[in-house]
Amino acid sequence: MSISLLCLLFILSLIPTPSIGGERIWDNDLKRFLTDQEVNMAEIYLKEEESLKIMFPKSEHVRKELIKLTPEKKALIEERIGWKFPEESFEIYIGETGTQIDGYALVQNTIGKHKPMTYMVGVDGKGRVSDIELLVFRESRGSEIRQKRFNTQYEGKTVLDPVRINKDIINISGATMSVRSMSAGIKRVLVLVDEFYLKPAGRGSDTVAARKSEKSVFTSIF
């Protein structure tokens, strides 16, 4: 090995490399390790309180509840959404006007490409996505998901929709991992609201499915 190459290797060994938990982060698309700036970046777009005002603009008051998942309920939700997650409890905001529930909102933290992104998902009283607001983005690319021209495609989605790329969600070139992450979190929110609030009130996916089945039978007979 030449002296010049040895000197280069020595110099490179002195250059600090970005890490999380002591490990350098390799980006397959960029074909290099991420820089310190890329690893430590965090773009803050909205605070949680600001996002709640967007989610519930007309509600008289907003209350917060903590829902805890039993092992059985957690397994059921994981089966419904198609992926496992570590959380065993979630904080949910409920907007109310008088005795009427205007909707629900949950903050989600799901992994994008390398790090978690934080966003709030709003669901109306009938179980339809009403709004998506990106709070914090920690990646160097993919923040286009906060643009309304993209995330409005989630609005109106229910627990009965796939909420998946190439199914009912159009991808963003260069931001695939962010889109998948957000879609997964939205699907989880829809299932959580369905299991803990809509089903107990007789307005859940099981009731909707039963009505569709009855309508189909009625139509086939007449």
Image (cartoon, rainbow, N blue to C red):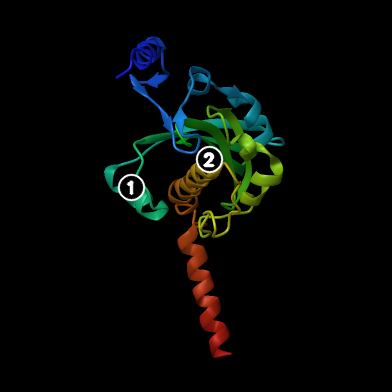
On-image quarter of the N terminus: top left
Find residue 218 and report its image quarter: bottom right
Residue 178 marker: 2
Observer-nearest of 71 and 38: 38
- Is 157 situated above or below 176? below
Report the residue at 53% width, 45% height from top: 176
- Is 173 situated above or below 218? above
Around disc 2, counting alpha carbons within 10 Å, would you say few (fewer than 14), some (14 to 19), or many (20 or more)?
many
Report the residue at 51% width, 58% height from top: 162
Residue 73 marker: 1
Q: Secondary structure at mark 1?
A: helix
Q: Is residue 179 visible?
A: yes
Q: Could you say where residue 100 lies in the image, as x and y percent from the top left? A: 62, 44
The amino acid marked with disc number 1 is Lys
Marks 1 and 2 close (CB-CB < 8 Å): no
On-image quarter of the C terminus: bottom right
Observer-nearest of 216 and 150: 150
Q: Could you say where residue 106 lies in the image, as x and y percent from the top left? A: 52, 37
